[in-house]
Amino acid sequence: MIKTSAPGKVILFGEHAVVYGEPSLVAALDKRTYVEADEREDDRINITSNVDSRSLSLEDLSRGGEDPLRYVRKALDLVFERVEESTGLELKIRSETPPASGLGSSASVSVATILAVSKLLGADLSPREIADMGHRVELEVQGAASPTDTSIATFGGMLYVLPKEKRVETVDADLSLIVGYTGVERSTKVLVERVRALRESYPSIVDPIIKDIGKLTREARVRLDGGGEIGDLMNINHGLLEALGVCTEQLSRAVYAARDAGAQGAKLTGAGGGGCMIALAAEHQGEVMRAIEACDCSAMTSSLSREGVRIER
Ligand code: MEV
């Protein structure tokens, strides 16, 4: 039996724009997804998880469909293809982040599954290969995806992701973040598609917004490196995400409430449409959490995780 885990994430800057080649800044959360994999004598693949449980055949892995286990199915399909071998499996999955919440549960389950099952079959994939395979899972399931979520699930810490250069850089910064969860599940695929449609209808308006988000992200990187303030930049980023149509009334209420309660900056995080927001609050943490909770959200302080995907001993 092999047990692995990979962290969830919060995007600090650059969601959506990163799908069009702009950089993103992302941090790993200390909330992880755990995957336990064991071989079976027959060729059934039994998956139990906190979102869904199924018994699948090998043929089920490559078929389409929007079931909650689609990322796991695709991850298994790609691992079997890579190691040129397949096997029946017992797979147990437990995630500490809510599904479809913008905290990277799909990427962390994909990456942890890739490591667990490749190891079980005797293959030693490099972290780079795991990250690339995780990205392929997201591309094939969602149609469009940047390498942001799967890179952070693999490498952990804080990363500056440069999709055009196919490169990630480590950022060394410590932030006191509060995460507010609206409790509303949403589909990244649908939200990425919404931005694509808006861009197609109004290219001369939407392209500059995407480029401006890229500028903000570059500026935030410079400031984080120099120990400078990023609160205002988070607020501007939130405004631009509202302009792209991925915000909701509840998310914006929580963002404004957090700022009014003393947060230095606040924005939605991830694809939007529900899911989560983040507030930067070195001080007034109690007030900021209560303000977010008053907007029908759950609030939690969160430490960032240095560790990416790993084998659990
Ligand atoms: C989702 O966590 C972030 C998006 O930018 C999509 C992606 O980067 O693939 C919305």
Image: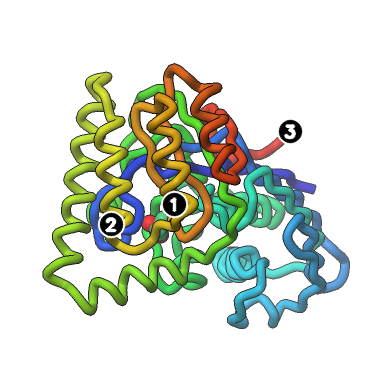
Q: Quadrant of residue 230?
A: top left
Please, which residue is most extreme toward the left here? 204
What's the residue type where badge 2 is placed? Ala
Q: Which residue is mark 2?
A: 17
Lower sequence index among marks 3 and 1? 1
Residue 56, above or below 301: below
Q: Which residue is mark 3?
A: 313
Q: How many marks?
A: 3
Left/right placement of residue 53 relative to residue 303 reads right
Lower sequence index among marks 2 and 1? 2
Judge by depth and name the residue closer to the eye, 129 or 253.
Answer: 253
Left/right placement of residue 132 relative to residue 197 reads right
Q: Which residue is mark 1?
A: 270
User: Whole-percent x and y of residue 193?
Assistant: 38, 73
- SS assignment at label 1: loop
Q: CA distance from mark 3 to mark 2?
A: 38 Å
User: Whole-percent x and y of residue 298?
Assistant: 61, 40
What's the residue type where badge 3 is placed? Arg
Left/right placement of residue 49 relative to residue 122 reads right
Q: CA distance from mark 3 to mark 1?
A: 31 Å
What's the residue type where badge 1 is placed? Gly
